[in-house]
Structures are given as C-alpha cells and as structure tokens.
Amino acid sequence: MRRFLLFFIFFSFTFRLCLAQRPKVNTLQCDDKTNPINIDSKMPKLSWQVDAKERAVEQTSYQIIVADNISTIKKNRGNIWESGVVKSSKSVQVLYKGPVLKPTETYYWRVRIWDNKNHSSKWSAINFWQMGLLQPADWEGAKWIAYQKMDDSLRILPGEEFVKGQSKGTLNDTLPLFRKVFSVRKKIKRARVYISGLGHFELSINGKKIGDHFLDPGWVNYQKQALYVSFDVTKNLREGENAIGVILGNGFYYIPQVKHRYKKLLVQYGYPKMISRLLIEFSDGSVQNIISDKTWKATPSPITFSSIYGGEDYNGCMELKNWSTINFNDKNWMPVKLVDGPPELNAQAADPVKIENKFIPKGVVKLNDSSWVYDLGQNASGIPEIMLSGKRGDTITLIPGELLHKDSSANQNATGKPYLLHYILKGGGIEIWHPLFTYYGFRYVQVNGAVPKGKENPRQLPVIESLKGLHTSNDAKPAGSFSCSNKLFNRTFNLINWSIKNNMASLFTDCPHREKLGWLEELHLMGNSVHFNFQVYNLLKKSIEDMKLAQTPDGLIPEIAPEYTVFTYGGDMFRDSPEWGSSSIIIPWYLYRWYGDSTVLATSYSMMKRYANYLLGKANNYILTEGLGDWYDLGPNPPGVSQLTPKGLTATAIYFYDLNILRQTATLLHQPNDIVRFGQLANQVKEAFNKRFYDPQKKQYGSGSQTSNAMALYMQLVPEDLSADVLKNLVDSIVANKYALTAGDIGYRYVLKVLEDAGRSDIIYKMNNRSDVPGYGYQLAKGATSLTESWQALPSVSNDHFMLGHLMEWFYTGLAGIRQAENSIAYKQIIIQPNAVGDIDWVNANYQSPYGLIQSNWIKKPKEFELNLSIPPNTTAKIYLPADKNSSVTESGKKIKYRYEDGKAVVSKGSGVYHFVVKE
C-alpha cells in the first residue's frame, strides 16, 4: 500500500508537471484582427501565439479546424476545413485553404500545436470571423441614394480644378438626414449592417448612434472605390417597429466652393450619398434584408456647412428631435433620389478613427468681453466639444489653433485659415455640441460670442459651462512602449508619438490641418518607427491600395495617395519624387518583413515593377534628378527643397534600394527573369552612382553632407574597400559640426541607422541629447508638444508633422536593442543589442511582435550591466552584451560561456525569461 501511495504521488506530480509544461495557444487573429466581422478576402490569413513556461520552446506542428456552427467546433471538428497536422513552426499569416467562403457567413476556428519538447497544447479558445459582401450581388439590390443628384458637368475631379477653374465649384450646403421605418416580426438571432456613406456617415437605430467611430468610412480614390463598414446591431433591434437613420458628411468626397473658408484644394466627386444593407437573421433560420432604396426619405440636417478643410456650422434651431425613432413624423420629408456610386465597394479593413483622448483646459485667457481662449495643453488632432446655455438663435464661433498670436488670439497662419466652427443655440437649457464631419490640429480654442461660467457677462451672452478637446486618431492598437532614465529622451519620445497619433487617420497624413494629405515618403521613412508603437498592418495595407489606385498609366506613383489634387506648381517637383513614390516598392517589402505576409508582395508586384520601369525611363544614364531631394534639411535658407545634398543623389540611392528589393521579391515569387534583370540593373545604377557622386580625393559622396554619405552607406552603394573611409568622413563631419544635425526628411533616418549599425550610438546620443541647436530638444524648449514640421520649430510652418521623427526607431533598436535578424520574417529571429551610452543608466522597452512580446530592460551600474529579457515562444534570439574579454557573465545567477565579438559578449537563446549580469 505504501509503495502504491508513493507511486500515486509520483504519478500525480509528474502528470501535473506535464500539464504545467504543455504549451498554450492564444491571441488568435484573422487578417490581423480579433473576431472581425467584415472579411472580404477569399483566403483569410490566420495567426496565433504560443504561450509556454519552459525555455526554448518552438512549435513543430499545428492543426487548424474551421466550422460554420458553434456546436461542431465545440466537438473539435471542422465541417468546413481541417488542415490536418502540418509540420511547420509558422504561426503567423497561415492561409486558409478550405472551400470557397460565403458572404455574410460566420466561421468558427481553433488551433492546437505540438512543440519541440514533445508536448501538445489543448485546443485553443474558439474564435470566429464573419465574411463581408464579396461582390455586387451580395448587396441584395441595395442602391446608392441621395438627397440631391449632381449633374456630371458639375463634377470636379482631381486635376480638373484648375482646368475648370476654382470658381466653377458648387456650394452644396445640404447635408442630408435619411430614415426608414421597418417591422421585425420574429425572434432575432443576429443582425448586421453593411453601410457606406460618402464622404462620411453616422448611423442610428431607434434613436441611438451605432458604434463609436469618427469619420467613417476611410477616405479613398472615389473614382475607383468606396469603403463600407460593418456593425453588429443585434442588440439595437427589437421585435415590432424599428427605425434606421443616417446623417451624411462631405469629407474629401465633396469640398464646398466657398470664399470665406479655407480649402487646400477643390474636388467634388458628387453630392453626399449612401448605400446600406441590414441583414437580420431569425431564430427559425429565415432572414430579412432592409436595403437602401427609393422607399427611404430624406431632409436637410441641422449641419448647414461642412468642409474637411474649412470647418462646420450647426443650426440648433433646425434640430429635429428623435428623428431616427419610430415616433417621428416624417410626412414633410422628401423621397430619396437613386444615384450612381463608385465602381467598387470594399470592406474597411483598417482600424477606424475614434475619439482616443479628452483634454480638459489648463487655463483660459480673456481677449475681450465676448472672446476667450482656452489652452488644452496638448497639440492634437481632433475637434472641440462645448457645453453651454443661452437664448435661442444666439451664435458662437470656435476658432482652433496650434499657436497664439501676440495678443493671445488663435493663430491659424500656418495651418489653413479661416477654419471656423459656428453653432447656433436652440435655447431652453444646457446644450452640448461638437462637429461631426471635420477635424483640425490644435492646442488652443478661441470662443467668440460667449463667456465662461462664473465670469462677468454684461452683454448676457451664452454661458460656457465647459469646453473639452476630443483627440481623434486611428484606433490601431499599441505595439510597444519605451522609457529611459534620460528625461529629455522620454519627452522626445512623447513629442514624436503625439505627432504619429495626430497623423494616423484612415491614412497617414502629413498634418491634421493644412493639408491632411497622404505624402508617401513618410510611410517608408517613418514606418519603422511607427510599427514599434502601433499595430499598423491593416492601415499600411490600405496605403498600398491607395498607391495602386493612384498609379498613372505610365507607372508614376505620385507623391500623395489618394491623389486628390494634381500638383503642378514647380513643374513636377511636387508630384514626381522617387523618394516619395518608392513607398510603392518599399512598403510591401517592409510589410512582409514586419508581419510575415507574403501575399502582399504577390498582389503588389505589378505596381512595384511598373514604378521601377517608370523610374528607368526617367533616368539619364541610370541617374535620377527629379523631385524634392532631402526635404526640409537644415541649410542657410528657409527650409524646403534640399539645400545641402544634391537631390539626384537621394533619388538615385532610393532607386538602387528599390531595385534590390525587387530582386529579393522576384526571388521570393519565383520570377527568374526578373531576378537577373533587377540584379543587372542595380549593378548598373551602382556603377553610375559612384562615377557621378563619389569624390576619391575627399573620400565622400556628393557635397559631403550628412545625408550624402549616410545614404550611400546605408543603401550599400559604397564599395566595400571604401566603406570605412566614408563612415569616418561622416563621423568626422558631425564632430566638426559640433554634433549638430543637418539632414532632413529623407536623410536623417539613414544618418541614424548608419551610425547605429557601425556601433556609434554615442554619436547619436550627443546629436540628440541637447536643446541648444535645432532638433528635438530645441523644439521642446520652444514649447512644442508635438513634433514640428521644421527642426527649428518655426511658427511659419506646421507644428504637427511626424516626418522628422526618425529617432523613435533608435529608441527601440539602438537603446533597447530590439531588432530583427537580417533574414528574419515577422521577428522569428531576434537580435537584442542594447547600447548603454551617455548618462543613460536604465531603459525599459517592449514590442508586441507577431510571435509575441519581446522585452528588453537594462540597468547600468558601476562596473556592472544587468539585462532582463523576454523572448517569445517559437522564436530565437542572438544577444549582444557589453563586455570585454575578462568580463564575468551570468544568467539567473549561473556563470555562462559566451563568444566575444567586437567588444560584446554574444550568446544565443531560445524563448524564455532571462536575467543577465555582466561584471568587469
């Protein structure tokens, strides 16, 4: 009995230990989303992460099952698709390979894995995805409907505004309300709505707004497509009578022609319109569709003016109470008009724009008896919200601004003026209002025609109960975080991060006020920084689609996409810059490297090749000279077109980089002829580049500027035997310039990367840990709360651009040392190489990679360096620790062996949590 008891105890302990060691599967995603409801891909991509307690755990096999009902998947069966046991360590972007998926259908899935420790996981939790509408027939006859129909002769498309003349545009001051009442006579199982409103919409059912999105749907090239949004509205419907209501805004679809408001450009695709399908599934298996058709009614809304550039006006006296409920009397409303819409309707895959933060004023200043200025403390993208009371018909004006004039009034000189928000009170109590279909970049809000509560009010003006700033941004989920012991670098991190957030809408914009345009160089130059902070896979996929639709028949990728205006001033300078258009080649490659999606390369390859062919046609003896060059570099003149670096140098260097990416892409896609062609062409460009730009006497490129030498080095245009000399030249020039930066929008990222890769983060530290010369610290000293357009924080240009925020990447890759190995995909192989420079004595950073969380936290002490590290399961890491040949290196208190390379102790580890200590 005693032996049996001991055996039972041993068996129980062993069994529990085995259970504890079994890996788990979590973080299931379909097309990089958790339980999405609008998938329109015919072959969705499935991803998951492995959770394991043991070290060095790798997945060796996986099994996926997919079912079309919950009861089947609970039995661990897939009546739609079973992958079988697949021997692979891949757990990101695994293609669904089952039967054709049906529109609006819900599919449930789960996965289990086996690891290299002879353990298997349990089946994961059950996740699902819902298909969207895959073809026009799936809209069940829904029509585009409008309050007014624009005659084709009145349309102004991009490129036509100067041909037709800006005075030819129309001012359509009618933003419509739509409504329809319908009956539901059965028990509802599930209900979803698919809707697009151009330029934007807000949807209500039975008097309540659906969702928390802002400026839905995302803006695109409306000549070729529109996006639709899906909502689960099961809980919003009831048996019996229901009412659905929609209000439309103009957005970029229709920019009103008006003289007393700012407009960057004039484009008018048509008057506002919408299309929708409400699908109701009943418990008995039957369905009901409520579609947009001629049975709907429409009337003007209280929004009497709305412009994405000029602001918004709202007349509270026109407000229709309960207009989207069944009890509202719509007998005076007009029948809708059936109209045409864009040729394609695609699901909005990118995260929506939402209200992400709310700012309470830090102070208020009186200008006069009727004008007050509120300081919200942070320059941000968004809209003000005001709560006030007053008499019916009283009018107030809100004027947002980034900066203030000397008299403390709102300053819009550099951000597009006048941008105004007018509100007419309806009277009768407290009123709360904010605009619905416009946004701006601002820190200050000037209120004219009202007085803050508690202040003297001799003219009996409306009383401001409160004012807030509503920060709007793309709802992309956080990907990483960074902090360190250096306060200036922490403030710099926040400075850059705010401008990233302020310029993430339904695309990456240059600024949230003056232009709101998708200038493309930011994608590849700042993409590395952005992807460490936010999960931007789907947002960048939209950017790729925008570039495809913007590409011209001859292959040009313009500098902005969508191309809402065709820039003609300065010749083609503001339309044709290789440093901008090359995002069409670089971003698909980066997306593959960062997230593991090879299909994006296959679907983008035609665009990539066509642009490369376009550049070849523009080149003169393989040298490109068009474009803006190193935009906004620091020279003797006001910033703008490159001053210090020959623009042909930056354009040709980017071209060479493009060709190498195309050669690698052709290899991946098994295109042997293209492999040879792009390889040969790259060699010809390299030869021409060195012949044109290398100075053998000075051992430098171009003018010898920071950008000139750094780009030649980074793009591997420098012959190997000359690299050391050119690098020394770069470092010496920075030292001679007293560590002041001069590179601009195009070049500064490469200056940082070349120095970091050469082990000279000490130079980067000295260049950026200061406030006395133009740069990040200088901007902060000037009072900036978001990254400014110019290194000098000039008040004459935007104070909310993210194009110069390249130091963000170094915080993660240089200081924290989180990098991806050269041939790794989706951070499958990781490099950890922290740099303890200057006065920094600790760094805490993490990055949520596709395979899981990477953490790098280090502390520098006298004669000791401590690194706490977390490597996710199913990955490996090569770790570089600062050490000399005589250093003692321990991990979790145990002395370990290491290789010694270039002043570093090098160890290789699998997944797990590690604690390294290096002692002199």
Image (cartoon, rainbow, N blue to C red):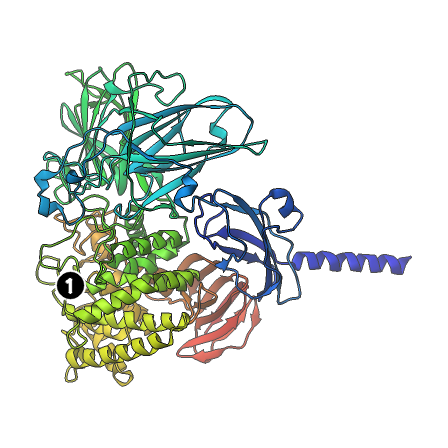
Residue drawn at (15%, 39%) of the image: 153
Q: Nearer the viewer, residue 222 or 639?
A: 222
Q: Check disc 1 and report the residue beneath it.
A: 627
Q: Classify residue 352 as left or right of residue 771.
A: right
Q: How many marks?
A: 1
The quarter in which the C terminus is drawn is: bottom left
The quarter in which the N terminus is drawn is: bottom right
Q: Amino acid at mark 1?
A: Gly
Whether residue 219 is visible to the viewer of this picture, yes or no, is yes
View extreme (right): residue: 1
Q: Nearer the viewer, residue 283 or 135?
A: 135
Residue drawn at (19%, 49%) of the image: 782
Classify residue 251 by image quadrant. Answer: top left
Task: Say what secondary structure mark 1 lies in.
Answer: loop
Residue 489 in percent (x, y) is at: 31, 56
Residue 230 in percent (x, y) is at: 42, 39
Whether residue 55 is visible to the viewer of this picture, yes or no, is no
Q: Nearer the viewer, residue 576 or 590?
A: 576
